[in-house]
Amino acid sequence: MKSSIIISTFFIGSIVPIEEVAPPILVSDTTSYPIGHDSVPFTWDDFVAAVIMVESSGNDSAYNKREKAVGCLQIRPIMVREVNRQLRRAKVDLRYTNEDRWSRDKSIEMFVIIAEGVESDGDIMKFCEVVARKWNGGGRGHKKKATIKYWNKVNKELGFN
């Protein structure tokens, strides 16, 4: 049975754990999110850092004029709209602006909100792959052949070949 893996939700700077799934994702504090599964040799922060390195080489001021992608996670305006759509659906009053893309913290918050919408069968590596590929290719990105190369780059940043 598939379930949503909810990592955490950021509301006004604090982390609110939403639910547990098997294997559990343990939220320890605002800077480290151990995935809590012995076969996964990286943390949530490692995964986010790998995506940031692939997207912008860690540059919070990165700007791609052609795609209008901004910040460390190279967020486009359409992604801000999608995040806000998900927040509205969840009846959460928080909203992001295109300016928020320049903030590393707010960019990561948006990334987490997108990740929260990903279903999982409990396989954390598969979950991270789907999150990364959707981040790169949109809502159906995990089904697009073109996003496999992106996932391979994230894997390489995580230390896998």
Image (cartoon, rainbow, N blue to C red):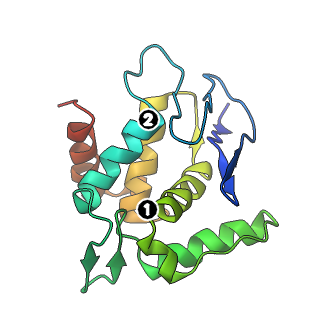
Between 140 and 106, which is closer to the camera in this rendering? 106
x and y percent of residue 59 in the render?
26, 63
Identify which residue is drawn at 65% across, 42% down. 6
Question: Image quadrant for the C terminus?
Answer: top left
| Label 2 Cα crowd, 10 Å radius (few <14 / some 14-19 / many 20+) | few
Inspect the image, locate mark 1, and give the three-letter code of the amino acid beneath it.
Answer: Arg
Identity of the residue furthest to the right in this view: 91
Inspect the image, locate mark 2, and give the three-letter code of the amino acid beneath it.
Answer: Lys
Q: In this image, 41 relative to 1: left or right?
A: left
| Label 1 Cα crowd, 10 Å radius (few <14 / some 14-19 / many 20+) | some
x and y percent of residue 37 in the render?
51, 18
Q: In this image, 95 relative to 45: left or right?
A: right
Q: Which mark is residue 6?
A: none
Q: Which mark is residue 104?
A: 1
The residue to which callout 2 is attached is: 126
Identify which residue is drawn at 30% across, 82% down. 67
x and y percent of residue 26 in the render?
62, 28
x and y percent of residue 46 in the render?
37, 37
